[in-house]
Amino acid sequence: MRPIAVLPATAGHATAQALFQVLVHQRLDYDVMSTDEFVRSSPIERASLVVALVRGLDVPTVELVRTLRELLVPVFVVAEELSEADEVTLLHSGVYDIVRATASPRLIGARLRTMFHHVHEREPSRTPYQFANVTVRPDHYEVHVDNERVPVTRTEFRLLVLLAQHPDRAVSKEVLSDLLNESRRVAPHAIESHVSRLRTKIIAAGGPRLIESVRGVGYRLHVPS
């Protein structure tokens, strides 16, 4: 398992030191780096979990969360100043979990370890999937048709990986919704829209109709013969 990436961001020195002690106590490996260093890191070597230390809900925090969302990285936020409304706003923006810096080390540690195991248990294989001329690369979070990259959203990519893990097997919309691992649960009926857009993008790029609808069940990734 790759170490956790800790981004001190806008939080103070005391908050960072307290978090380091929690990580050591929980025996969780971590690397401290700036946001720029993390963004420039290779997707293959990049941490699969980020702990962002922030002062509160301000412009730098919003920009940080947006940047990490674009990299498809789960984010655990430790905030020094945070109202309930701020917490709700950050959760809705895609943050995986939030805890106040004033919380006890025991609580912060428990929530961090729970998230760590949850993320790694659901982390997809980093080996590329190949279906006809379509390549799905979990290590780079990319989908290619021949040599052309297909622009997909985070949700579309995760749906494709979930189906790729079970080729030629029907997976219900309810199960896909539960397994997506989004900060906000994607309703089963919304899965239809995501799948439709994903299917259209792959076909438009010259790929086959990989994803089939299974009436009364959900979807199946069909492996072309």
Image: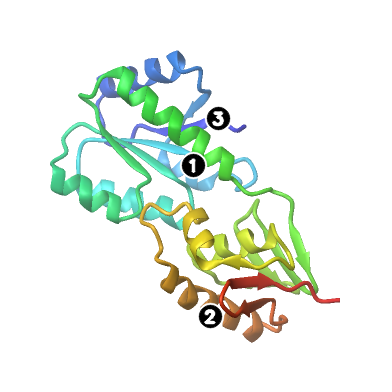
Front position in the image: 225 or 207 = 225
Residue pointed to by mark 1: 38
Within 10 Å of disc 2 (Cα), the crowding (few <14, some 14-19, many 20+) is few
Q: Earlier in the sequence, mark 2 or mark 3?
A: 3
Badge 3 marks a residue whose secondary structure is loop
Q: Earlier in the sequence, mark 1 or mark 2?
A: 1
Front position in the image: 2 or 189 = 189
Q: Is residue 47 visible?
A: no
Say which amino acid is labelled 3.
Pro
In the image, which disc is placed on residue 3? Answer: 3
Residue at x 48%, y 48% (from the top left corner): 73
Residue pointed to by mark 2: 196
Residue at x 35%, y 32% (from the top left corner): 8
Instruction: Quadrant for residue 93, please give it.
Output: bottom left
Up/down of 116 relative to 125, above or below: above
Say which amino acid is labelled 1.
Phe
Tag 1–tag 2 contact (CB < 8 Å): no
Q: Percent position (x, y) of residue 200? A: 58, 83
Instruction: Quadrant for residue 171, please give it.
Output: bottom right
Badge 1 marks a residue whose secondary structure is helix
